[in-house]
Image (cartoon, coloured by chain):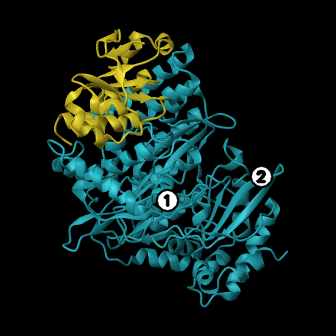
Amino acid sequence: MPLITDTGFAPDDSPALIDMEALPDAGEGAALDLPLDADIAAIVPHFNRLALIVVPFPSFADGRGFSIARRLRALGYRGRLRAAGHVITDQYPFARFCGFDEVQISDILAERQPENLWLDAQGRAVPPFLKRKARGWT
Amino acid sequence: MYRYDEFDHDYVRARVSEFRDQTRRRIDGALTEDEYKPLRLMNGLYLQLHAYMLRVAIPYGTLNSRQMRTLAMIAERWDEGYGHFTTRQNIQYNWTKLTDVGDILDALADVEMHAIQTSGNTIRNVTADHFAGAAADEIEDPRPTAELIRQWSTAHPEFAFLPRKFKIAVTGSPNDRAVTKAHDIGLRMVLSDAGAPGYEVIVGGGLGRTPMIGKVIRDFLPKADLLPYLEAILRVYNLHGRRDNKYKARIKILVHETGIDDMRAQVEAEFERQMREEGGPLVAPDPEHVARIAAYFTPPAFAALPDRSEGLESAMAHDAALKTWVENNTSEHRAPGHAIVTVAIKGTGEAPGDATTAQMRVLADMGEKYSHDELRISHEQNVILPHVRKDDLPAVFSALRKAGLATANAGLITDIIACPGLDYCALATARSIPVAQDLSRRFAAPDRAKAIGNFTIKISGCINACGHHHVGHVGILGLEKSGIENYQITLGGDHTETMAVGERAGPGISAEEVGPAIERLVDAYLDRREGENERFIDTYRRVGADPFKEALYAA
């Protein structure tokens, strides 16, 4: 299952994921598998021990992950943030904007949407609102 | 009127090539049909019964003559010579070929238009009062707010895959012509006790199979807080809106199931969180940018005129048809000597909202020559000339009459809203247009229509309620019962600031029975009303539903 970042496909190098129940006992550098219905405020105290949070995308049409990422970043999470599951290339810039660092997809999806399409996706038009924002207009 | 800046231009062009690329990837298999569909929809392209349909946004209903001419050109070149104005200030082309879509989108981009987010589970084309900037009763022009929302919501990375579609409407007048209480979010401009402008924020309204009247979530929101607050509502909805059942996925169901107080607490907490964010909320607009947008909507320089036009008065004295049209189809303008003209896109026996290429060109000419180059599309599927000198009304009437656009029925019983229904739509269970056509013929006599007065009939061809039947004084809902079209009548609906959802009158009736039943209902109303100024809805509220039910089912 390839990991996708701005430089293309890479092998999965991450530590084994822990679930919410194991969170209180997690050591430095833990990687959390975050359920979509998790109470995000409850994990804030553990942010500094987490090196990676993985947000699942059960379907590309289920956009909850985008809001979860925004909320995690707004609450101060600075570690790695991954969108994992059914994410399509067209969503890559959206995922990056919302605070994800990387995307992980299945081998089957990677076959259909290979590396070059993910690299192309970075060239997608940036919504005008964000461009104006970059200029301090909004 | 707003003009695109370099970012808008670049983006709209880029979206056209992006859509061409998405279609290519669908064809070569990189995208499955399931994956392609929402991408197609967020570019305005539907697959209908007989063909693709392209829905083009007319943001907050405002366009200029050049844009109207392009809409006409598209109808002529790539459709069958007409377009259909919708209840959400869009225009639909019902006979679009997939291979032409890229070219059509390019033609739209040439005149600063697009079809972005006119469909799909996205924040849709934002709508506003069609009398904005002209109405005498306005607190503030709602369009700078609507344009700001358009900019913010266009391709918002967080909200492109919502549980369901999301509609926002804005009004700047206490008289609500934008149906704000039937939107996912309705914004009403209000003044604080200290006189500062802001919004009353209404959430969770909607029609469809579960009609709900929106509830006030914030009495007064300062203008500067608008986008962070909208973002808070959308985030709560995106996280918690139901995704297990598309019929329960709108925010109205979330508000209903959560309760408005709990919903308010969640939204306020989310809003507060943003306000505490480092560097302030991400989407708080720079006041200079807001001022720049507002400047585009500076009213035109209206000539200083006496309010009474002697030319118009003497023309009306000699021309009864002109007089009737002026009385019915013009509204009070804020500038003396001016009027707002409603051009009925629903002549006798015609499909509501359908305009031919030739008619669109006449409308463009009228806008250019007589209305400071501005036109509007109303949710009632009419076209508005917002700024016409009263002195020019006879000339406007004469030109419109030649084009078959001078039906004097604004607000009257034949000013019917109807969805495309089974004639076009893949979701429809019954036809809407023939029912509207039949009713428009039955009440075509101008004197009778005038005697009946303000009366709204709204027709939907399925329970999704695109024809707003829930909020018509009389609503007609077309269903299908063992293969036969069957029409349910609702009574007492109201789409304005006193919004009410109509109540079902009784069992459904056949298509042929609808016309006679409505005629009996109207007669019953005329018998019971107290004075000529008592509208049907007033009589209904005074005497109750019983006499009208009796009349409907008297046959």
Residue reaching furthest front? A25
As displayed, is residue B257 above or below residue B236? below
Q: Residue at x 27, y 27 (%)?
A: A26
Q: Is residue B1 visible?
A: no
Disc marking residue B180: none
Which residue is at a point 46% across and 32% down the rendered structure image?
B105
Q: Does residue B262 appear anywhere in the picture?
A: yes
Foreground of the two, B102 or B180? B180
Q: Which color is chain A depicted in? A: yellow
Q: Secondary structure at mark 1?
A: helix
Up/down of A24 relative to B194, above or below: above
What shade has chain B been given?
cyan
Asked whether A31 or A102 is in front, the reply is A31
Q: What residue does disc 2 label?
A: B480
Nearer the observer, B129 or B74: B129
Kindly identify the amino acid type of the residue bearing the numbered disc 2: Glu
Determine the chain carrying the residue at label 2. B
Side of B70 relative to B502 (left or right): left
The reply to whether callout 2 and callout 1 are in contact (CB within 8 Å) is no
Q: Is residue B101 left or right of residue B337?
A: right
Circle 2: element type = strand
Q: Quadrant of the C terminus of chain B?
A: bottom right
Residue B418 position in % (x across, y down): 63, 56
**Kind of residue indicated by mark 1:** His
Q: Is residue A22 above or below residue B259?
A: above
Please identify the quarter of the rendering in which residue B519 is found.
Answer: bottom right
Judged by depth in the image, the label closer to the viewer, 2 or 1, is 1
Q: How many marks?
A: 2
Q: Residue at x 67, y 41 (%)?
A: B426
* Pointer 1 residue: B256
